Image (cartoon, helix red, strand yellow):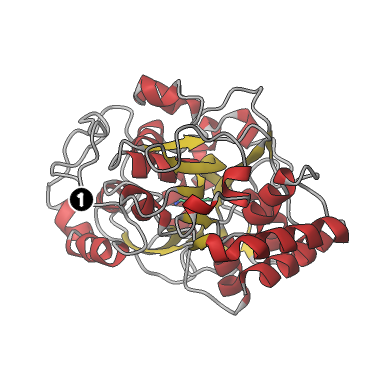
Amino acid sequence: MVRAGKEDPELNLLVGQPERRVGRRSFLQVAGLLAAAGAAGYAGGTVAGWGDDDPAPAAGAADGQPVPGNRVNERLLNIYNWSDYIDDRTIPLFQAQSNLRVNYDVFSSNDDLLKRMKSGPTTYDIIVPTNNFVPTYLNLDLIEPLRQDLIPNLTNLDREFVETDYDPGNRFTVPWQWGTTGIGFNRARAGGQVDSWSAVFEPAAAMSGHVTLLREPTDLIACALIHLGRSPNSIEDKDLADVVKLVRSIKPKLKGFTTDTYIDELAANETWLAQSWSGDVFQAQDQNQDVSYTIPKEGSLRFVDVMAIPKGAPHPANAARFMNYVLHPKVQARISKYVSYGTPVSLAKPLLPAEQTTDPSIYPPASTKLSILTLTGQKLTKWQAAYDQIVK
Ligand code: N2P
């Protein structure tokens, strides 16, 4: 699918038309496309337009030699990222540039990702948890330090993505994109402007069957706490009991809990109010001009999704090469332009359309009430228990 206004020859270094979003339903098709367009095909000369500032092909790429620093000697990289979180050029271009073959799978919640990573050894080389889960991955010894010497483009990161509380100095993680949690709504069906969490946590009867909430403990619990006027970090039993009571009481009015179907449902006028992540709503808006995004006036959350290497991954050096590639401003701009999330590399901003970089829904001003949460210890256990009582 070609998304209106998203084409930019400067950013599309590969000749050819873009395909569809790598979403939950489409990823298998795209995986097929990527396999068909494997490294050999691109190395055969279908790449055009590498500029002086493009990254040089990886050492050994031309002759297909093993890459030093991997545990398994294969020119392979297994990536596990969120659905609807990449354009369709980045993987083929990386394959062509590095002569590494990429398997790209998608997941749709931190809950799912963490369960999978806890369940035993994995073949993934890169996973993309949200920042608030990083302390848990570190406590459980599920991720390993990065080969920073293979990631010189770390210097491209904006300071706020380096000086973090969850991973100061990027020893374990490299930001992918960042965004906010808010409400995606259909202006025609949801009765005009929406500006409060009450739209989804106390939905009007007329909205019944057309409201979705996020299938993600952090967003669900924290935003319900904000709606109830409590601290978005509360672990008080009374507060969590009130959240459970509230969300259970509105369940009959909900279409459901989802993280990976609401883009299509908003676009198709099936869902009218969706607790959402920012860029996802703009992807729906590209298909349906009645769709808008709002950060509720009571405040909300801001998150950063970060690339990390699962402990003992087969190809950590290949993973580091991909991370370095993604930190290139042109690559950041290509991804960010397509998915409409925020880039952690300001050098990419001049390459993005002004309507994105000046949009306060994508790059909110400092005055917007946004919390960055951490989910550890008691909070993780209590919130997970509350979430389970709601969703199950
Ligand atoms: C992309 C979802 C963004 C991830 N579809 C939210 N952490």
Q: Is residue 120 above or below residue 149?
A: below
Q: Residue furthest bottom?
A: 120
Residue 73, quarter of picture: bottom left
Q: Residue at x 25, y 29 (%)?
A: 51
Q: Is residue 10 above or below residue 129?
A: above
Q: Secondary structure at mark 1?
A: loop
Q: Residue at x 31, y 62 (%)?
A: 27
Q: Residue at x 82, y 55 (%)?
A: 239
**Residue 364 shows up from this direction:** yes
Residue 110, quarter of picture: bottom right
Instruction: Give whichever of 298, 49 is nearer the camera.
Output: 298
The amino acid pointed to by label 1 is: Glu
Residue 90: x percent and y percent? 31, 47
Q: Residues within 10 Å of mark 1 (few under 14, many from 20)?
A: some
Instruction: Give whichever of 109, 57 is nearer the camera.
Output: 109
Residue 117, quarter of picture: bottom right
Is 164 displayed left or right of 33 in the figure? right
Residue 219: x percent and y percent? 63, 52
Residue 182: x percent and y percent? 55, 41
Instruction: Give whichever of 51, 332 is nearer the camera.
Output: 332
Q: Is mark 1 within 8 Å of ligand 1?
A: no
Q: Is residue 105 above or below residue 236?
A: below
Q: Quadrant of the C terminus?
A: bottom right
Q: Residue furthest front?
A: 205
Instruction: Count the marks.
Output: 1
Residue 188: x percent and y percent? 37, 38
**Residue 257 shows up from this direction:** no
Residue placed under numbered mark 1 in the picture: 19
Q: Residue at x 57, y 29 (%)?
A: 158
